[in-house]
Amino acid sequence: MKRLFCLILLVSVIGVSFSPGFAEDKGVKSGTVTLSGAWAIYPTAVAWAEAFQKLNPKVKIDVSAGGAGKGVADAIAGMVDVGMVSRDPDPAEIAKGVVPVYILHDAVYPVVSDKNPALAELMKKGIKRQDWINMYITASLTTWDKLVGSTGSKPIHVYTRSDSCGAAASWAAYLGKKQEDLRGVGIYGDPGLLEAVKRDPVGIGYNNFAYVFTRGGKVLQGIRIVPIDSNENGIADPDEILEQRNAAIKAIEAGRYPVTRKNYFFTKGKPKGLMKEFIEFCLSEEGAKIVDQVGTSLPLPKTERQKVLKDLK
């Protein structure tokens, strides 16, 4: 009788363990996804993470900034699930197993203080590509007066990024070089570089789309975007003067602005599981709406998002 009771009890336990009622959490997502990397992607990634976690309370999405270089290194080393990278992948990174997932796009802008002594002439004439090269690559252009054709010797304080990042890589690519070729005082991170330029009336730097516009759409107080004289006519044309976010978006979408770039999620191997589901959410219609709400990057067109999603399958 005792043996029969034990057998009945064991069968009951097994039955409960596999009953539909016990497995009601089967479809509930749980776990953690970690991301690190580009400052440009960080604000949007945080908003995506918050929205995904609201839909899936048992999921944690951990997002940290630190520059595109950190995102690449962390993804390759397996320290995070996703590296946020604001530049195109390098063949050497692909060889190490990196799978780049195109997630956003934006641009990089040259900035000066709104107290710059040559500001009026800069906004009138813009700066030609060769002059940018002479400031950032050859260091042969060292005064604002020489740049705008006035008399005097006000120095140009050139600032660049000290951390490996997509903004510097994109800016250097526009000048035909790589980040390590850029001259200037190295400053860590987008916020740091922006603050250095704001505080220095004779300084010049560059920043991601995410950091130069306010939520209201205006250029951040204390700085001005320097027009790039793309057509080399010696004049800052109306479509080269960017003082509103909407104007900047139009210039990017129309292909008129010369320093645009793609932003990626880098994964070690093809994304799968919870990581894949999070990336799919980021590329969904809801994800695109979140990008617009945050306003620091641009969502991919629907057809492009669908193509990326198809490649993930």
Image (cartoon, rainbow, N blue to C red):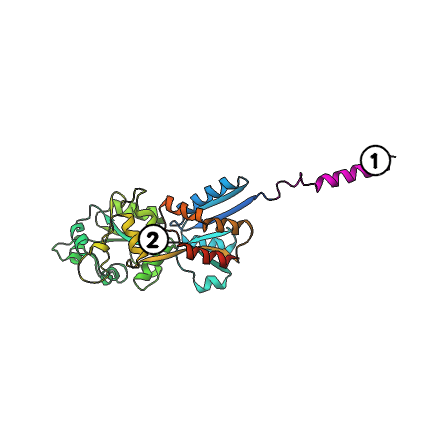
Residue 238 quadrant = bottom left
Asked whether, in this view, residue 304 is left or right of residue 248, the answer is right
Query: Which residues fall within the magenta stretch?
Result: 1-26
Give the residue at x 28% y 55%.
Answer: 251
Coordinates of residue 290 in the picture (x, y in percent): 41, 45
Q: Residue furthest right?
A: 1
Give the residue at x 43% y 62%.
Answer: 90
Which of discs 1 and 2 lies nearer the camera? The answer is 1
- Which sits in the foreground, 120 or 295? 295
Q: Which residue is mark 2?
A: 161
Q: Amino acid at mark 1?
A: Phe
**Principal SS element in the magenta part?**
helix
Residue 1 quadrant = top right
Examine the structure image and report whether residue 22 is included in the region drawn in magenta.
yes
Q: Residues within 10 Å of mark 1 (few under 14, many from 20)?
A: few
Secondary element under disc 1, as helix, strand or loop, is helix
Examine the structure image and report whether residue 220 is included in the region drawn in magenta.
no
Secondary element under disc 2, as helix, strand or loop, is strand
Q: Amino acid at mark 2?
A: Arg
Q: Would residue 141 be visible to someone looking at this image?
A: yes
Give the residue at x 30% y 47%.
Answer: 212
How many callouts does the rendering have?
2
Coordinates of residue 213 in the picture (x, y in percent): 30, 46
In the displayed structure, 5 sits above or below 274; it is above
